[in-house]
Amino acid sequence: MNRNITSGFDMAAEIAHIAIEEFKSHYVTKNFSGLMQRYYYLVEEDYGDPRSNRFPMMSNPLYTFGLVGIYLSWVLVIGPYFMRDRKPFQLKRTMVIYNAFQVAISAYMFYEHLVAGWLNYNLKCQPVDYSDSPMSKRMLNLCYVYYLSKLTEFADTVFFVLRKKSSQITWLHVYHHSVTPLETWVLVKFVAGGNATFPNLLNNFVHICMYFYYMMSAMGPNYAKFLWWKKYMTELQIAQFILCIIHTIRALFSQQCQFSKFISSLLLLNSSIFFCLFMNFYIQAYKKGKNTTALAAANQAATCASESLQKPKSLEVNNNHNSQDILPSLSQKKVN
């Protein structure tokens, strides 16, 4: 197979053809585990970046799948069971240090994405450089650091569990932290550079802002007055996915772009899914919340108005009662 197939969906078609042929040969012996292993080795042999084999956990995806499985087990079962009869941990200092680390590593990766690639890349379309040039190796190393950083972000959810912040452990949060390590493993193994790193560049910038916000939030209520921009963090994340979608569509439908159409399709699908999920979260958290608050305020105002209309009547009744009490006493005085 040819690694540089880019026209249409030739890569996907060729993989499908080989998959069918291998299935036919293994179906006779019912060796389906061997079939899956054969599938992986065929894809790795023909499309894998051999330079990535020097990194730990890059020989096959089972290590990453295993770590994601451990993460999900802790978040969904082990962690809640462990914390069931315990008070929430405060972890204030730990949270500040952790978020400061994430700000620092995100800033480093953002800088490296610019220097190793995007200050010189073609913004419209940039193929992957599989050579051993210094800049190509630098980008490959950066992609591996980016992969490792996604594993460290498992701690986000671990801290939520330990602090009993169950409302923060949404389906979007768990899905995001489960999928990104698998995506970044594919990035290092097959497409460490070019268009595939554009979402990483944007994500690093977003994470600088996001973890800086979390760090200030963890520093205590004295810093709450500086956290007015929480809403805009979600808007920044949504803008990130919009830019990724536009950038990927341009490469996908450009006849001159030499970046893989198959990988572009996967990037487009991934960005679209996250765009829909974050938009739904934004609407639920801010738009509907705002409408609910406005409705509650209107109901309160109506209640206050109703009470104010009833007060004069009660006063009038009280005045009538008072006059009836006073008049008999006055008439009695006249008689006397």
Image (cartoon, helix red, strand yellow):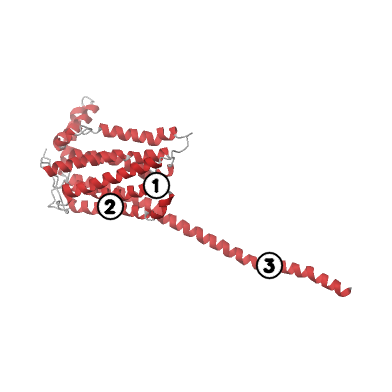
Residue at the disc numbered 2? 240
* Callout 2 crowding tier (Cα within 10 Å): few <14, some 14–19, many ≥20: many
Q: Which badge, 1 or 3, comes first in the chain's sequence?
A: 1
- At 27% from the left edge and 50% from the top edge, which residue is drawn? 205
Q: Within the image, what quadrant is residue 177 found in?
A: top left
Q: Position of residue 26 (x, y in %)?
A: 20, 28
Q: Taking 214 as reference, is 189 left or right?
A: left
**Alpha-carbon distance for marks 2 and 3?**
61 Å
Label pair 2/3, CB-CB below 8 angstroms: no
At label 3, which amino acid type do we have? Leu
State the SS at label 3.
helix
Mark drawn on residue 219? 1
Marked residue nearer the N-terminal end (1 or 2) = 1
Residue 171, given in percent of the width and then of the height, sits at: 38, 43
Question: In this picture, is 332 found above or below 208?
Answer: below
Q: Is residue 78 visible?
A: yes
Q: In the image, which is nearer the foreground, mark 1 or mark 3?
A: 1
Which residue position is annotated with label 3? 315
Kindly identify which numbered label has been placed on residue 177.
none
Q: Quadrant of residue 9?
A: top left
What residue occupies the far bottom of the structure in this picture?
Answer: 334
Q: Is residue 4 visible?
A: no
Residue toward you, 66 or 150:
150
Pair 1/2: label in front: 1
